[in-house]
Image (spheres, helix red, strand yellow):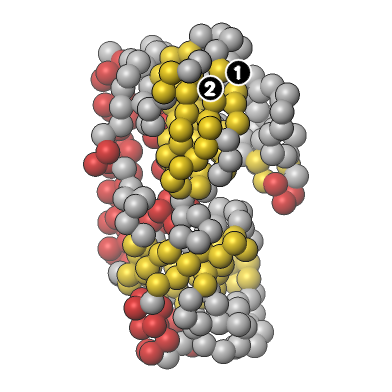
Amino acid sequence: MDFFALSVANAAVGNPSDCAGLEWALGGGSIRFDRDCAFAIGGALASATLSGQDVAPCTTTYTRAGEVLSVEQISSGRFLYLACSGGFDVPVLLASRSTYLPGRFGGYEGRSLKTGDAIALGAERGERPQEGFHCPADLMPRYDSGIVHITPGTHEELFDESVRRKMTESEYRISAASDRTGYKLEGAPLGKSFGTLPSEAGCPGTIQVPGDGMPIALMADAPTVGGYPKIAVISEADLPILAQRRPGDTVRFELITIEQSQRALKRRAADLHTISQLASKAAGR
């Protein structure tokens, strides 16, 4: 859901950005480490301790076999990420180690983790990162801003100017009926039903408008096709910001051009590259 946060956590422990991590949603819990390793948490802000000592976010932390990482609660944001040096060693399926819960495949037995599960870590690569390395805050997304940038969707012309303006002038609230497939947004409705449209390709970030006029933002587990009209597409650079909004949180949309969206994504990539370089330098690589 927040690929940038996962990539930052991986960088902090010396992993490539495509190493598997744990995505931890909303609640608390604990993990016991059965081998020495480096780890980092990021994304949502959490009250976390390692054997009673506070764990800072986006910071390289070392643990010894037998120590326990406890997350008391996620205080801000929706998805917490845990990366460990070597990555989590789950099978590769369809060129990915991720879990697709609706299909019950991938990841660890195709399901969410439960008490008693044990997941192996992969082999560490190169030198271990320096303990205490911290990702600079100015290289991270502004999770607290609540501003999400959008570009015109493929069916923008079906909505008149007043409706398109309403979308950018209104505040929307994340509905409780929101999950990894899509975030339903509550607020000013965006028009009437347009009937059935031919299905066409979609992608995470697409904002569809069903018959009730209440927009739905497709997220990481979104279907690849759909027939609802698409009024807008969220800039990929801002998908982490939306992903971290909880039910009840609000968001506002700002319209930008496709070129501006592409530049924003390039800046995100440059920020991630800088974080990786800083972590490598701190480790002496």
At x 51% / y 44%, what residue is drawn?
Answer: 79
Quarter of the image with the C terminus is: top left
At x 58% / y 10%, what residue is drawn?
Answer: 66
The residue that mark 1 highlights is 32
- Residue neighbourhood size for the residue with mark 2, other residues' Cα within 10 Å, grouped as few (<14), some (14–19), many (≥20): many
277 relative to 123, above or below = below
Give x and y (percent) for residue 5.
42, 40
At x 53% / y 59%, what residue is drawn?
Answer: 247
Which three-letter amino acid code belongs to the residue tagged 1? Arg
Q: Is residue 110 left or right of residue 230?
A: right
Q: Is residue 85 visible?
A: no
Q: Quadrant of residue 192?
A: bottom right
Give x and y (percent) for residue 21.
54, 32
Total residue callouts: 2
The residue that mark 2 highlights is 69
| Residue toward you, 97 or 144 | 144
Q: Earlier in the sequence, mark 1 or mark 2?
A: 1
205 relative to 71, above or below = below
| Residue toward you, 50 or 121 | 50
Give x and y (percent) for residue 177.
62, 63
Q: Is residue 247 visible?
A: yes
Per the model, the C-alpha gap separating discs 1 and 2 is 6 Å
Q: Is residue 27 left or right of residue 106?
A: left
Task: Say what secondary structure mark 2 lies in.
Answer: strand
Give x and y (percent) for residue 138.
24, 41
Q: Quadrant of residue 270?
A: top left
Which three-letter amino acid code belongs to the residue tagged 2? Leu
Task: Say what secondary structure mark 1 lies in.
Answer: strand
- Residue neighbourhood size for the residue with mark 1, other residues' Cα within 10 Å, grouped as few (<14), some (14–19), many (≥20): some
| Residue toward you, 17 or 51 | 51
Contact check, label 1 and label 2, Cβ < 8 Å = yes
